[in-house]
């Protein structure tokens, strides 16, 4: 790696504060130095860059040059990142604790019901679960590991494939036994209310139109029926007899085992995404993270082994 060519940090801090305030005195108050010291740092930076960053105004204020405007915007972001990285480095590291970021439905339907087995296996490990649908910035967020739905390929991160998704219809046993509207094959869905999940931030999600097209029934009207933002909401509606929902082998939870939902037929469609556990490569062997990785990979393997057809 080539040697970095960087100006002094003190000059950058003074310039960024002066650019924000458009005033050397206010910048000095923020940095606990004199306005003269701010001006000296700015002049030093301008000399280092060999170009002016400010235009001095008669009113004792300053205005940024075009170069100064662009430079200030970038330097402000860099200093914010440096501040956050420093705060993270100074934070005491709890060797037996970690924070997991995951999707709402995965947390409710899969992860949380299994945390009891984690406690039995790792009684000293403390886990904090956070809900998020966006990508995790490990450098800026207080998150140790993340569970996401995607296609893999996460540069710079330790990645463990947990599970693939298969989508299939589910309904209540009462709805299945309706003598006036039998539900024995996919074509019978035309007579039933379809419950839709519209998840946030997941492209190419398997919706009813895509599922019906995949099983050769694109002519069924898939625009009708209520819509829900999370899987657990659609499953609850199906368990209440309100219609037929699309479930996945990952997020069906204990609905099938408890008999709250049933699969009316074995047809299923493979989803385009998989569940992955990711964390920074540098921290993957930290004892708490390594223990969590071993546990969740074992749980995912056991879940996949039990995910067989009806």
Image (tube, rainbow, N blue to C red):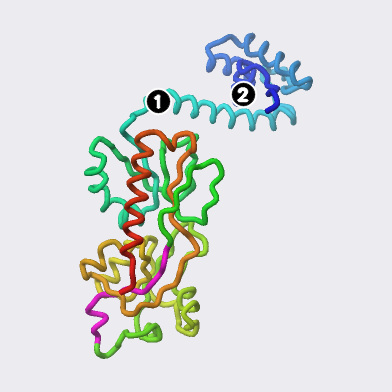
Instruction: Give the residue at x 37% y 76%.
Output: 194
Is 176 one of the magenta-colored residues? Answer: yes
Q: Tag on residue 16? A: 2
Closer-to-camera residue (180/285) = 285
Q: Tag on residue 296? A: none
Q: Quadrant of residue 144?
A: top left
Q: Is residue 31 above or below residue 102?
A: above
Instruction: Give the residue at x 59% y 22%.
Output: 17
**Residue indicated by mark 1:** 91
**Res. 226 in view:** no
Q: Quadrant of the N terminus?
A: top right
Closer-to-camera residue (176/230) = 176
Left or right: 79 with respect to 105?
right
Relative image position of residue 39 (x, y in whole percent): 67, 13
Q: Is residue 211 above or below residue 250?
A: below
Segment colored magenta: 165-178
């Amino acid at each position: 790696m080539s040697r970095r060519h960087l100006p002094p940090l003190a000059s950058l801090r003074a310039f960024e504060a002066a650019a924000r305030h458009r005033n050397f005195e206010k910048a000095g108050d923020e940095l606990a130095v004199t306005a003269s010291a701010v001006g000296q740092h700015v002049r030093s930076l301008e000399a280092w860059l060999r170009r002016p960053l400010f235009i001095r105004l008669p009113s004792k204020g300053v205005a940024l040059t075009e170069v100064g405007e662009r430079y200030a915007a970038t330097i402000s972001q860099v200093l914010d990142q440096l501040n956050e990285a420093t705060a993270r480095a100074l934070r005491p590291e709890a060797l037996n604790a970690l924070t997991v970021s995951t999707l709402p439905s995965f947390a409710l339907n899969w992860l949380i019901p299994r945390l009891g087995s984690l406690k039995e296996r790792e009684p000293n490990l403390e886990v904090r679960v956070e809900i998020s649908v966006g990508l995790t910035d490990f450098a800026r967020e207080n998150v140790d590991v993340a569970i996401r739905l995607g296609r893999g390929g996460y540069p710079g991160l330790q990645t463990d494939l947990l599970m693939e998704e298969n989508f299939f219809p589910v309904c209540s046993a009462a709805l299945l036994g309706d003598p006036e509207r039998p539900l024995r094959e996919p074509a019978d869905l035309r007579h039933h209310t379809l419950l839709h999940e519209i998840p946030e931030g997941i492209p190419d999600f398997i919706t009813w139109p895509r599922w019906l097209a995949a099983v050769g029934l694109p002519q069924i009207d898939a625009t009708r029926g209520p819509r829900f933002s999370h899987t657990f909401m659609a499953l609850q509606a199906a368990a209440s007899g309100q219609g037929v929902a699309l479930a996945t082998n990952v997020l069906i939870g204990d609905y099938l085992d408890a008999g709250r939902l049933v699969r009316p037929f074995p047809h299923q469609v493979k989803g385009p995404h998989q569940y992955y556990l990711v964390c920074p490569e540098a921290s993957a062997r930290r004892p708490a993270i390594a223990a969590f990785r071993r546990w969740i990979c074992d749980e995912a393997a056991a879940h996949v082994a039990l995910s067989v057809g009806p």
